[in-house]
Amino acid sequence: MTAQNLLVELFVEELPPKALKKLGDAFAGVLAQSLKDQGLAPADATVTPFASPRRLGVHVTGVLAQAADKPVSQKLMPVTVGLGADGQPTPALLKRLAALGADASAVAGLRRAPDGKAEALFYDSIAPGVALAAGLQKALDEAIARLPIPKVMTYQLESGCDLPGWSSVQFVRPAHGLVALHGAAVVPVTALGLVAGNSTHGHRFEAAVDPVVIAHADAYAETLARDGAVLAAFNDRRFAIVQQLAQAAEKLGPGYEVLMDEALLDEVTALVERPNVLTCAFEEQFLSVPQECLILTMKANQKYFPLVDTHGKLTNRFLVVSNISPDDASAVIGGNERVVRPRLADAKFFFDQDRKKTLESRVEGLAKVVYHNKLGTQGERMERVRAIARAIAQQLGNAALVDQADTAARLAKTDLLTDMVGEFPELQGIMGGYYARHDGLGEDIAIAIEDHYKPRFAGDELPRNATGTVVALADKLETLVGMFGIGNLPSGDKDPFALRRHALGVVRMLIEKDLPLELSELLLLAFNAFPAEISMYPAENIKLLESFIYDRLAGSLREQGYTAQEVDAVLALRPQRLGDVAKRLLAVRAFAALPEAEALAAANKRIGNILKKAEGEGAGVLPELLQEPAERALFDLLGPIVDQSASSFAAGDYTASLQILAALRGPVDAFFDGVMVNADDAALKANRLALLRHLHGAMNRVADLSRLAA
């Protein structure tokens, strides 16, 4: 059977740019996997996706014209049902064979094999391999059906369609062409009312010929680039754009750098078929507007790439990725400069208007903005954040910080009422910082207002000063407590209020800032800022929210490279000072490397199981009741070992605190070899349980060592 490379292309109207890469990868991946599953393509076939604004395609290597035949074994029924006492086939067996295309002559060749408790009859046959046309049709249908389409369109088929009876189809965009080539041969498949051929269309304006005929599956990308002026592969276009952007900035001189936003690169790649980067400029007067505003309007509204200097300051030059390459680009450049000017003028107008009112004058307006129908207005929320921020600052023992945090928390949300944030919600916090400086509130307050949303996403930087950290903690805790209080919890992959991100933000600040704050106390003071209907059952709510935060912490630690055992051992104790978690993890890792660790972990697990069954028994050790040499030896050694371990623990040396316990291995092993814990004498039993309870507490001060047991 001859293997050839396969090319499939679906030519459509302009696809949604933000979904293009995902659509292209899904189309190629599903189609290729279906071919592999049917035996038409090898498991190691090279799959190359193509995705441009007007096409989805895939190139698969080593595709067979027909899949190889394969043996098939089908269970029919138990022997007692299929054969009578005389060994002759029953009507039920003959009916089943007939359904498979066989007759009574096949009975002699049936295979008997055990199936559970009974013996069953199996029909072995050879299934012919699927032909490429049928297999590709199935793969194409699956690929189209499983596309992650953001929104489906229903459209009428063109007149003269080769599939009579169809009146309309549903797809992400109207489809106008289908290419399916196995080597140089067209594969007769259909999709969306289209019949496969070997021709497609290139660039709307710059294609050398139309239609573009693809002579061979392997010539697809080259032919489209040459005759159709299209770079069909998404990654090829993206790479070309990155190269051209860098070259354009380099031509302007050493003082220019491109802001290459990854999401913007993907979106622009999905908007052009043959990229051509052009350099444009705007009036320098607009640079008086905060650069975040200008950058956002250029990127979000116009899909432009701003240029900054070596210090990261915005310049008045920007780059445009055009979809055409005229000999004289001046008209294209002028058009883009003309389009961006009103956008920048709007930003300047908003900035100038906003500065006519102070942030303080906007505080009252927060009472008119609904935050959540069960949690009140932004004004009420602001008061809760203030209360939490003051309480956190007081716990940190800094009177000046209390006042600073209170002021920053009071003003942090006021920029929501500004024209600039109304136009660009992404700038909330950032604009508050600019307006705070304009109002003369000082750099500390301005930075805190600007940073109180941080970290906004995974890997984002933390607030830069103590005031910002306190307000950011308060803001995230208020959100978590409020949403948990009214039952708006994340479920599955749905987290509309970004509670997982807020929880990770709290975790990161407590750990990376090494704040001397206990998690349960933080949650309690946050609950206390809410009215009774939210904090009616604080113990239950705090426990639930605390577990949620520890779950986020556990996932984060595993992503950082700690093992599940290490994380479980440390977090099983619910350490309240999260800044200590990393030291505890390193101590557990060092302990686990000791030769005594495995035996002590197993013993610790055994002790825990014993103590669970004896709750309340064994309050304190009475030395006079220690009868066996092994229990006296353990007791005598335990005292100094516990003292040394506790001293190291108090000093924050968790590694030493655990390693000191290694000396207990011998006495602990001897205890379990020579002492009966559940003695008949109740007093002896209680005393031995008390000794184990004392040992258990000493061993599990840093982490639950039983979690290290195999």
Image (tube, rainbow, N blue to C red):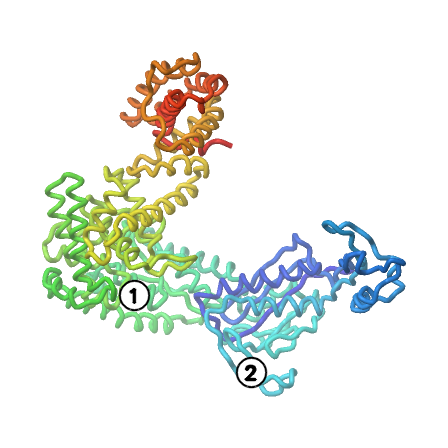
- Amino acid at pointer 1: Thr
Extreme-front residue of the structure = 681
- Residues tagged 2 and 1 counted as in contact (Cβ below 8 A): no
Q: Nearer the viewer, residue 522 or 625?
A: 625
Q: Is residue 670 left or right of residue 82?
A: left
- Amino acid at pointer 2: Ser
Position of 11 relative to 248 (above/below):
below
Residue 542 visible in the picture: yes
Q: Which residue is mark 2?
A: 168
Where residue 102 sits, quadrant-wise, is bottom right
Q: Which residue is mark 1?
A: 297
Position of 508 relative to 359 (above/below):
above
Tag 2 secondary structure: strand
Q: Nearer the viewer, residue 656 or 627?
A: 627
**Residue 308 x, y percent position in the rendering:** 30, 55
**Residue 164 x, y percent position in the rendering:** 65, 85
Sequence-wise first label, 2 or 1: 2
Q: Nearer the viewer, residue 338 or 539?
A: 539
Mark nearer the viewer, 2 or 1: 2
Q: Is residue 669 left or right of residue 464?
A: right
Q: Residue at x 63, y 86 (%)?
A: 165
